[in-house]
Amino acid sequence: MSMRRDPMAAAAELIVLLESLCKHPRDFLSSGSNCNEQTLESLSTSLVCTVGEISTWPSASNVIPGQARNSSVTFTVDLRAIDDVGREAVVYELSNQMYKICDRRSVSCIIDRKHDANAVICDQELSSRLKSAAYSAVNKMVGQIHEEVPVLMSGAGHDAMAISHLTKVGMLFVRCRGGISHSPEEHVLEDDVWAAGLAVLAFLESH
């Protein structure tokens, strides 16, 4: 074992480090990372990191991946945050940590950035009108309510991001059972669909 160079172990170490970095970004990002207090605070509440795919080759139970020619361990890292500067600082720190881990374990590594997208801030006026419309819809359905209509930050990439350079954008969300969406298990209540329809109608009528 003392002579082994195992990229799977290196990947596992990095994935655990990634979790710690994204849970506690302040512990990893120093003043030299271009992150001011506002950025660090934003990362503390909005940063999410996901390793969604891991593949090995030759993927045999008794073969160390990466030892033979053309064999490898490949995994994806998805980083999302509302602050672009902060997210880039996390990418930089994670890359540095990855190279250090691989160097210490005497394995090679390649980082290939597949996709980048800047965060998009919804228009305040549109968001305010959607919030009022949602409040009006719920009032029509159940009577006077005193709770605030929640305002959400979406970590997902929506069509609104793709057209934000053309026009102002805002979004109205319909809740899904258990927070599961884009899945065969996605489920919404009929009353929630009805409320969303009333909200859209109220929004259009207010314009």
Image: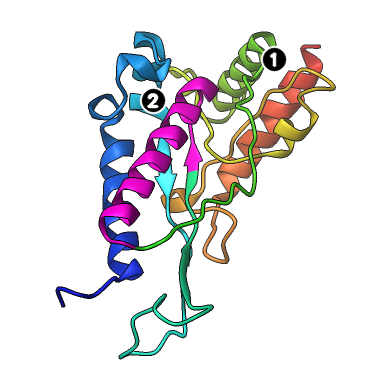
In contact (CB < 8 Å): disc 2 and disc 1 = no
The label shown at residue 3 is none
The label shown at residue 126 is 1
Q: What residue type is labelled 2?
A: Leu
At horizontal 63% and vertical 43% (from top left) the residue drawn is: 193
Q: Which amino acid does label 1 sit on?
A: Leu
Cα gap from disc 2 to disc 1, whole angstroms? 25 Å
SS at badge 2: helix
Residue 13 placement, left or right of 175: left
| Residue 140 position by quadrant | top right
205 and 41: which is toward the camera: 41
Q: Is 131 within the magenta?
A: no
Give the x, y percent position of residue 52. Answer: 47, 59
Question: Pointer 2: what residue?
Answer: 43
First to last magenta residue range: 79-106
SS at badge 1: helix
Give the x, y percent position of residue 190. Answer: 59, 49
Mark toward the start of the polypeptide (2 vs 1): 2
